[in-house]
Image (spheres, rainbow, N blue to C red):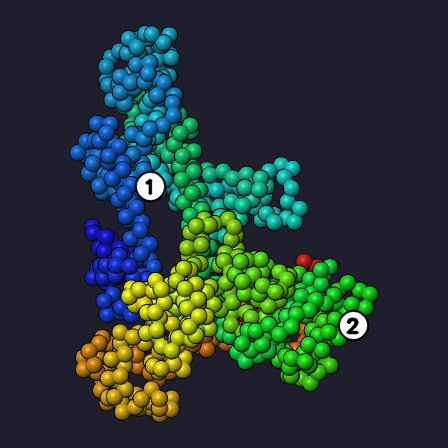
């Protein structure tokens, strides 16, 4: 099968769609650009489908590269047969390919290789052939008692070593046993004697067993971590019937042969010494890869939810980075993100610190007309929340509110070169408070400054393949940034870097040009940026916004290549971009009601998907998709676990989604767990969602809150 046919089959797509996607991606186009502006070519493939197709394409090409290397190696050994060549050509996975290559793979000296050096290969061949000779095994082996082989027993043992390796290396045997092991083998886990597990993290797995096909991804990762920390001992149990059935498909002792017992002994040795340990490694690796892929998908979904949280524009925000001994760092941020003031307060150290801290906060709120307080969710968060609630209790209701902000990565950002460049006059400890405040005003613009792996959404983040995780999270950031769009005249280099076709170097050049020449008057002015050529402009232009510039269409997500179509549509509707939005939307709706989309698309010279996108943008240019999400919860008072009672219904914010449910911030010190069994079938939750939940139980001693829908 050609690449497009194979990928289309795997992803349930049409080969024509995949072929177009491959051609576009190989031509240097980015996934966001292809998904948004080449829908006619790909048949409407979205970003997810394009990323999956790109991943499959990379996998298939890597497989073919490995196939070519293996063929060349075996040809060099002069051992390639037509049958083997056909098997290698037909191999559809790397595992099958490596199984076929195993007998020819250069390896260190083994018991089998040493036996071959003693001239015992012919005897091993006899054992494999199972001749029905009337001679006993000892007589057949006697002729090989020469040189370094001193006895018949030694000759037979060496020959069995060769046979055992042959059985273990057989691709068919390995494939069959691996398949059965992935279905029927049992993973047994026990606690290592005297191993320290002070918090009882792995209590569930002290004496645990499960069929491997029933293990859930989070269980696999937990067991792996416990094993790595030497708390747990893990063993894969493969039944004798399973390995015997797999081996006997290719090697069967003939009871009429004097060498039948030798083959049986070699089979048992092959299984226990070589085959079963290898298959155990393969199964554990497969389980881990599946679990990691699932965990990475969860991370990616959580990160998308976090980045798509709606901004709270127009607020003067007081950000608080809580702390005990070192105090709470405070920063007041103007609605534009400009730093107005900073301070350090010590409300949790006694000696009048609380009263002095309240006075400082009250002064800052009054002087800068603060309307919102953002509190980081780290150490001393809830104690600081109580301080803020006490402060707001003495003020008119609703004048100032607060919310808890995920501060993950703030300390990493504070010490970064980017933070030093943005806030050279601020101490590193105060930059975290600035970041927390700005995350409220525009979560996306602030979070893109932080390595996605430092944001910390999901579980077992450090236990998965870091390269794969980084690639997936970077893809999410790129996707969200381009989905939302970027104001080219206000965006930071970090935000511009994520725009399709830009990258770090061009982002710096765009900002440098903007600082030297002033704001961009239109998208066409981007051509003046050194190094920003036609291809980069093509990829990036549609995702960059120029608001209140010379060209009204520049504030929309319509690509400059489609401006002619957009103007033709406006003319057909009898309206202009400068008309009032309500009137323009009404005129466009009337046009669509009169002329079928397919006909209108033909008349203006484009496809239906592109026309639909253009119509939506003309009606509401530059609409922020984050507007559709529920706004963050704002509070003015604080709850404690003592206030909670079973049956109470509260609104909470989803902070993390994991395999077994979702953790929800309901305004107390500990997030509650909404177990997956409590989520109605068909309902989904994602990070940032605001949901009404019911308190089912409270375990104050263990700090656990169980929630229901």
Q: Residues within 10 Å of mark 1 (few under 14, many from 20)?
A: some
Disc 2 marks which residue? 355
Q: Is residue 673 visible?
A: no
Name which quarter of the figure residue 427 lies in.
Answer: bottom right
Q: Is mark 2 on a helix, strand or loop?
A: helix
Q: What element carries label 1?
A: helix
Separation of disc 2 and disc 1 at Cα? 67 Å
Q: Nearer the viewer, residue 580 or 480?
A: 580
Mark 2 or 1, closer to the camera: 2
Name which quarter of the figure residue 191 lies in.
Answer: top right
**In this rendering, is residue 274 above or below 692?**
above
Q: Residue placed at 82% from the left, 65% from the top?
A: 351
Q: Which of 342 and 695 is in front in this view?
A: 342
Disc 1 marks which residue? 95
Residue 57, position in %: x, y?
29, 53
**In this rendering, is residue 629 above or below 306?**
below
Q: Which of 707 and 61 is in front in this view?
A: 61
Residue 27, position in %: x, y?
25, 59
Residue 357, position in %: x, y?
74, 71
Residue 83, position in %: x, y?
19, 34
Name which quarter of the figure residue 593 lies in.
Answer: bottom left
């Amino acid at each position: 099968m050609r690449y497009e046919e194979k990928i289309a089959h795997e992803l349930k797509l049409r080969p024509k769609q995949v072929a177009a996607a491959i051609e576009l991606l190989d031509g240097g186009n980015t996934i966001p650009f292809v998904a948004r502006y080449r829908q006619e070519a790909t048949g409407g493939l979205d970003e997810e489908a394009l990323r999956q197709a790109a991943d499959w394409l990379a996998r298939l090409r890597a497989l073919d590269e490995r196939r070519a290397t293996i063929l060349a190696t075996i040809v060099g050994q002069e051992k390639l047969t037509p049958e083997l060549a056909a098997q290698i050509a037909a191999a559809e996975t790397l595992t099958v390919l490596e199984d076929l290559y195993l007998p020819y793979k250069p390896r260190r000296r083994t018991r089998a290789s040493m036996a071959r050096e003693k001239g015992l290969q012919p005897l091993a061949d006899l054992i494999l052939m199972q001749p029905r000779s009337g001679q006993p095994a000892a007589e057949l082996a006697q002729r090989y008692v020469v040189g370094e082989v001193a006895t018949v027993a030694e000759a037979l043992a060496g020959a069995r070593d060769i046979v055992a390796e042959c059985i273990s290396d057989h691709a068919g045997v390995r494939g069959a046993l691996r398949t059965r092991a992935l279905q029927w083998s049992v993973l047994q886990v026990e606690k290592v004697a005297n191993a320290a597990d002070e918090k009882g993290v792995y209590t569930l797995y002290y004496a645990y067993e499960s069929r491997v096909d029933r293990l859930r991804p989070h269980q696999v990762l937990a067991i792996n971590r416990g094993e790595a920390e030497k708390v747990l001992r893990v063993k894969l149990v493969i039944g004798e019937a399973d390995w015997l059935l797999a081996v006997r498909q290719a090697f069967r002792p003939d009871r009429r042969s004097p060498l039948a017992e030798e083959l049986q002994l070699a089979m048992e040795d092959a299984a226990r010494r070589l085959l079963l340990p290898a298959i155990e490694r393969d199964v554990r690796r497969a389980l881990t890869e599946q679990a990691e892929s699932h965990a990475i998908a969860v991370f990616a979904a959580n990160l998308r939810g976090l980045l798509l949280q709606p901004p709270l524009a127009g607020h003067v925000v007081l950000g608080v980075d809580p702390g005990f001994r070192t105090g709470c760092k405070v920063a007041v941020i103007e609605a534009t993100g400009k730093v107005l003031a900073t301070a350090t307060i010590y409300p949790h150290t006694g000696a009048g610190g609380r009263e002095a801290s309240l006075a400082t906060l009250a002064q800052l709120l009054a002087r800068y007309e603060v309307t919102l307080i953002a509190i980081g969710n780290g150490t001393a968060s809830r104690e600081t929340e109580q301080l803020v609630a006490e402060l707001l209790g003495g003020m008119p209701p609703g004048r100032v509110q607060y919310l808890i902000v995920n501060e993950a990565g703030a300390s990493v950002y504070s010490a970064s070169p980017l933070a030093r460049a943005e806030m050279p006059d601020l101490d590193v400890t105060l930059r975290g408070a600035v970041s927390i405040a700005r995350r409220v005003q525009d979560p996306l613009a602030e979070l893109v400054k932080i390595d996605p792996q430092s944001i910390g959404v999901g579980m077992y983040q450090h236990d998965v393949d870091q390269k794969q995780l980084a690639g997936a999270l970077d893809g999410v950031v790129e996707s969200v940034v381009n989905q939302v769009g970027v104001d080219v005249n206000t965006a930071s280099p970090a935000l511009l870097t994520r725009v399709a076709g830009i990258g770090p170097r061009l982002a710096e050049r765009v900002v440098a040009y903007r600082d030297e020449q002033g704001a961009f008057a239109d998208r066409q002015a981007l051509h003046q940026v050194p190094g920003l050529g036609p291809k980069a402009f093509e990829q990036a232009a549609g995702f960059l916004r120029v608001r209140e510039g010379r060209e009204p269409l520049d504030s929309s997500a319509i690509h400059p290549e489609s401006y002619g179509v957009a103007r033709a549509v406006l003319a057909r509707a009898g309206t202009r971009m400068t008309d009032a939005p309500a009137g323009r939307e009404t005129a466009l709706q009337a046009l669509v009601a009169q002329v079928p989309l397919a006909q209108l698309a033909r008349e203006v010279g484009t496809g239906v998907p592109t026309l639909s996108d253009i119509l939506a943008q003309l009606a509401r240019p530059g609409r922020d998709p984050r507007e559709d999400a529920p706004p963050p919860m704002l509070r003015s008072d604080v709850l404690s676990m003592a206030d909670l009672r079973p049956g109470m219904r509260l609104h909470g914010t989803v902070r993390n989604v994991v395999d077994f449910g979702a953790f929800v911030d309901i305004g107390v010190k500990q997030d509650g767990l909404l177990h997956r069994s409590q989520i109605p079938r068909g309902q989904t939750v994602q990070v940032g969602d605001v949901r009404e939940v019911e308190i089912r139980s409270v375990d104050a001693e263990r700090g656990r809150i169980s929630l229901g829908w």
